[in-house]
Image (tube, rainbow, N blue to C red):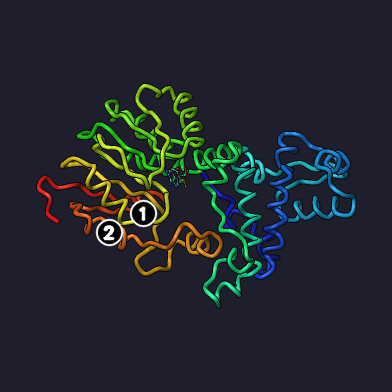
Amino acid sequence: MELPTLDKFPKRVLAKIDIQRAFILSRLIIAAERLQLFRALHDKPMTAAEIGKSLKLHKLYLLPFLNTMVALGLLHKQKDSYWNTQFAEKYFIAERSIYWTRQYSRECVSDYETLTVLEQALVSGKRHYQIKGRAKPDYLEGMKRDPREAEDFTQMLFHLHQGDAEALAGHLDLSQHRKVLDVAGGSAVMSIALANAKKNPHLHACILDIAPVCRVAAGNVRQAKLSRRIRTQAGDIHRGLPPGYDVIMFCDIGPISSGLLQQAYEKLPPHGLVVLVDRYVSDDGTNPLDRLATHFVASGFGLATRGQMVEALKSCGFRSIKSKKVYQDVWFITGVKPVASSQ
Ligand SMILES: C[S@@+](CC[C@H](N)C(=O)[O-])C[C@H]1O[C@@H](n2cnc3c(N)ncnc32)[C@H](O)[C@@H]1O
């Protein structure tokens, strides 16, 4: 799965972009996604008038908007007809589901809004919602209120995490383990990959997440024909982890409190395995760029480093701790609960 990072754009396009004004072009691309321009043009040329009618675009902006997409290498134009370039087809259709188109572009708009008070935030140390006098955004409550939001968010991650999941399944040796607790397991993408791996026919898993997310996960599990081996359990991960699992996994859930790790330690049997998967920050704090950038727009992710997570596992009592970057910027950190507790 690939993202349309700048290196994928034609050099002639990049040569025209001033990094300080790149945000204007970025915002226009987000608008194209929000309006589903590339989906409207999927496999089918349209005239400007047809696009204008279908997307309800005002004549003041219609042609400049479409022509900017042409200048960016995202649309072709001949006479009055426009159609997607291969680049747009690949990155805005083939590489992402409709959930991703909806959810990711919505998140990008909210990030833009957040950044309007960036200097005040940098100077005061306050979050954007505090500066604007608003309530702290709570994506979990949003998903509980609106099943469509839960579906978009969860299915976006189902698509986005396929590469991480396959890499994890290839990396982990679970031949001596039977039951995985996938804490805040979301779409079940990780558990499905583990259960689907040929080497793991014995493995069962449970997705612990909030109820609307569990419903989406159960659909994915059914689709993967794994309902007999993967179940869901609706609940709050901060209200205690269920017992009875010999692997406890935390994938892409931001900073994991020492309380939660300690719980995992207590609930695991001797030889039980804890697994952490995330884009943890490098020990010198300078990588990955994307995670650093996210710090300025999202309040939840924190900047835990690989080394800090390793130390956190050690201080809970885990031993044989290993950390490896197997796929892109994703760290896999594992630890084993020793037979005799050596805390
Ligand atoms: C970024 S997603 C990661 C999902 C999945 N682990 C993955 O790797 O794709 C974070 C998940 O944590 C869940 N979550 C966050 N706080 C939670 C809580 N207090 N109780 C249960 N689930 C929670 C969210 O619903 C969401 O599905």
Quarter of the image where the C terminus is located = bottom left
Judged left or right of residue 340, residue 43 is right
Frontmost residue, 43 versus 219? 219
Secondary structure type for disc 1: loop
User: Is residue 150 rendered to the left or right of residue 301?
Assistant: right
Q: Type of residue at label 2?
A: Ala
Asked if disc 2 and disc 1 are in contact, CB closer than 8 Å, the reply is: yes
Instruction: Report if the beta carbon of the residue with label 2 is closer than 8 angstroms to ligand 1.
Output: no
Tell me where residue 221 appears, x and y as whole percent.
Answer: 44, 28
Against 72, is 158 above or below?
above
Label 1: which residue?
A: 256
The local crowd at label 1, few if under 14, some if 14 to 19, many if 20 or more residues have their Cα within 10 Å, is some
Dot 1 amino acid type: Ile
Residue lying at the far left in this picture: please name it: 340
Q: Within the image, what quadrant is residue 110 found in? A: bottom right
Furthest residue in direction bottom, as rendered: 123
Circle on res. 97: none
Task: Determine crowd level at label 2: few under 14, some 14-19, many 20+ residues with C-alpha closer than 10 A.
Answer: some
Where residue 169 sits in the image (x, y, percent)? Answer: 34, 38
Which secondary structure lies at badge 2?
helix
User: Residue under circle 2?
Assistant: 312
What residue is at 32 percent from the left and 42 percent from the top?
A: 241
